[in-house]
Amino acid sequence: MAAPREAAARAEALRAEIGKHNYAYYVLDAPTVPDAEYDRLFRELQEIEAAYPALRTADSPTQRVGGRPLPEFAPVRHAVPMLSIRTETDSGPEGARAFDARARRALGLAEGAPSLEYAAELKFDGLAVSLRYEDGVLAQAATRGDGEIGEDVTQNVRTIHCIPLGLKGEPPALLEIRGEVFMRRPDFERYNARQRERGRPALVNPRNGAAGSIRQLDPKIAAERPLSFFAYGVGEARGWAMPASHSAILDALAAFGVPVCEHRAVAQGAEGLIAFHEKMLAQRDALPFDIDGVVYKVNALDLQERLGFATREPRWAVAHKYPAQEELTEVLGIEIQVGRTGKLTPVARLKPVFVGGVTVTNATLHNEDEVRRKDVRIGDTVIVRRAGDVIPEVFAVVKERRTENVENGRQWSLADAVGNECPVCHSAIERLEDEADWRCTAGLYCPAQRKQAILHFASRRALDIEGIGEKLVDQLVDQNLVETVADLYDPTRINAGKLAGLERMGGKSAQNIVDAIAESSKAAQLERLIYALGIRNVGEATAKELARHFGTMTALMAADAETLQLVPDIGPVVAASIIDFFNEKHNQQVVEKLLEHIRLEAVGKMAAGAVLRGLTFVLTGTLPTLAREAAAALIEAAGGKVSGSVSKKTDYVVAGTDAGSKLDKAQALGVRIIDEAGLRELLQAKETER
Ligand code: IVH
C-alpha cells in the first residue's frame, strides 16, 4: 500500500529530527533533548515504518540494528587502496625532524626554503574502516583487509551511533570516508564491568574490543559493544570539489556531520610538529581514548601528489609514536603489601620493563578476586599497563606463553600466600562478606599500618608536617621511637637529639622536623585532625562535615550511629566506621593524648551554632515575644532553614496567635507544630544533646 502523503512527510521530519539529536548526542556530546523525548520520537518513527514499510529508508535511524548473523563477510575491493603509513620509531623530537627532512628532500626544497605546512592529528588505536556514502547515504562499510580487498562490515558499522547514516548539507554523489573505529576507555570499563557482573568474558583492551566487535558476524553482538569513530581521510570521491588541503578535507567532513577529532592542528615545519607531539603527549592520559602516537601529513594535496608513494606507503605521511603503555614481562613473584587501613594488596614483582616512560618493577593486582579472574601465576608472561600517573597494573596473562614450569594448580588464594596471617605483624587477617579485600585485624599495632597511619597523619591535607617522609617514618617505627601518631608530640621520644642520630639526618634537618611538629600543634583545624586520624571511609569532605556538625572532637567521639547519620551524606556504613574507630580503646587513648598536645583552632560560630542543621521551619501567626524576623534569625543562626510554605518536607511549624492556612496545612500533612516556647526548648534540647 502506498503511504499517505502525511505519513511520508512525518517520517521524513522524524528522521531529520532524530538525526539531529543523534548528532548532538554522539558527535557533539551535547544532548539537546531528554532521553524520554528521544524515545518517543523514535517509537513514532518505528510505528510509521511498520505501517508503511516503503517508508523505511536505508538512512533511517531505526535501521542501525537488526540484521541477521552472516555466514561470512563478503569481500570488498577498495577503489582506492587503503594503505598504511610508515612509523617513526624515535619517540623524541628527532622523529619529527627526520620526517620533515625526508619530505623536504623529496620535494627538492633548498635549505633556506620556507617551512612545509603539515596537518597533525592523533593516531587512534583501533581498526581502520572505509565508509562509502552514495548521494549522502551510507551504502557500505569495509575493513582495510590487505589494503586491496577488505570485508563488508556494513551491518556492524551501522550500529555505531556516531557514524551518520546520512550526511548533512550537500554531499557529493560518492564519497568514501576513511577513519578509525575505536572504543573509548570509559565505555570499555563500563562494558567490562557489566560483563563481569553477568559472569561473561571481559574484553582484553579497548583496541581488541573495537577490532573484535567489527568482525562479529552477528550484528546484535556488535550492537552491544560501545564503539566510536573518527575520520582521518577520504578514498574515492565523485562529484566533489575536493578541498586543496588535508586539513580542509577534515573540516569538510566535520561539516557533513562526520566525527572528526578536535585534537588536530596545522603545523609549520619540524618545530611545529614537535610542539604538537609534546602537547598531545602531555594530554595523552587525560584523553578518553587510547592513542599510540600522532600522525603528520603534508597538508597541501598537490604536494602530496608530487611526493607520491614508496612501495605501499605514502611519502607524505608518517606516524610518530609515543612510548608504549603496555609491555610484556614476566612475573617473578606475588607479594602482599599492607596499607594504612590494613588492606592487603597483592602486588606482582616483575622482571624490570620500560613502559609508559618509566621502568616498572612492581604492578598492582588489586585484590584476590582480580588475581583469580586474571589467573596470574608466578612465571607467567603478562601484559603490564601503565597509563600516565595511574599505578602500573598487570593487565592480562598471555596464556599462550605459559610454560610447564609455571606453578600449576589451585586457584590462587591470598590467605595461603601469607600463611593466614599479616605478613608484617603476623596478626589474624580477615575478608568480610561483600568485601573484595583482606585486611590485617591488628589495626595500629601492625607496624605497616602504623607507618602508613603516620604518613597519612603528617600528609599535606592532614596536619601537614613538613619533612616526615617514608624513610624517616620507617626508622621511627622500626626503632620504636614512635608507636602511635600521638608519640610525635612526646618530647621524650621525639627531640632534635634523637632525630639527629637517625640515618640521613643532620642536626639542622632534625631541628626543622621538631619545629614542624611543634608548628602543627598550634591552632590545628578540627576537620584536618579528624581527617588525619585515618578513620575508614572518612575522607576530607566527610571530616569537614563532621567538624561542622559536632564542633568538638569530644562531641564526635560521643556520638552514636543515629546522631552521626544526621550529618549530611553520612549513611550507616560511614557511621559504623566512625563508631568502630572510637570504640577501639587504643584509638581513644591516642586521640586523648593528641588533644593534650594539639591546640585546636577556635571553632567558629558555624559549627557551634549548627544545632538545627538540616531542619526546615515555617513560621505562622504572631509569636508572644519574638518578631517574625527575630525568630527566623534564631533558627538560621542555629543552622536551620526558614521556608515560606508548608510541605511534607517541613520539619516544624512554629505557630503563634491568628495562625491561618499554614497551620491547617501542617495539621493536614501531620507536620509537627510547636509554639515559641517549643522553639526555645528545641534550641536548648539540641544544645544539651551535644
Ligand atoms: S592515515 C595513507 N591517520 O594507523 C594514509 N591513519 O598505518 C592512511 N591510524 O591502519 C592512514 N590514526 O588505521 C591515518 N590520524 C590517522 C590515523 C591512522 C590511526 C591508523 C590507520 C592505519 C594505521 C596507519
Image (cartoon, rainbow, N blue to C red):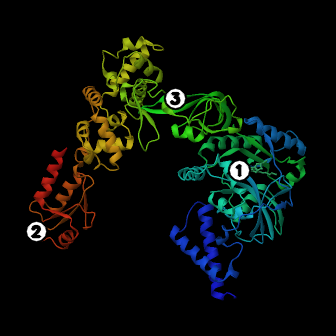
Amino acid identity at mark 1 = Gly
Q: Locate residue 326, reporting x and y percent.
A: 66, 38
Q: Locate residue 641, reporting x and y percent.
A: 26, 58
- What residue did someone put label 1 on? 126
Q: Is mark 1 within 8 Å of ligand 1?
A: yes
Q: Residue at x 10, y 68 (%)?
A: 657
Question: Which of the image's four quarters has the C terminus?
Answer: top left
Secondary structure of residue under mark 3: helix
Q: Are marks 2 and 3 in contact (CB under 8 Å)?
A: no
- Callout in the foreground (1, 3): 3
Does the image show residue 516?
yes
In space, the residues marked 2 and 1 are separated at their CA atoms by 74 Å
- What residue did someone put label 3 on? 417
Whether 424 is drawn above or below 145: the answer is above
Q: Quadrant of residue 179?
A: bottom right
Compared across the picture, whether 555 is left or right of 409 comes to left
Secondary structure of residue under mark 2: loop
Which one is in front, 436 or 323? 436
Q: Locate residue 169, reporting x and y percent.
A: 71, 71
- N-terminal of the pair, mark 2 or mark 3, is 3
Q: Is mark 2 within 8 Å of ligand 1?
A: no
- Label count reads 3
Q: Quadrant of residue 164?
A: bottom right
Amino acid identity at mark 2 = Thr
Amino acid identity at mark 3 = Ala
Secondary structure of residue under mark 1: loop
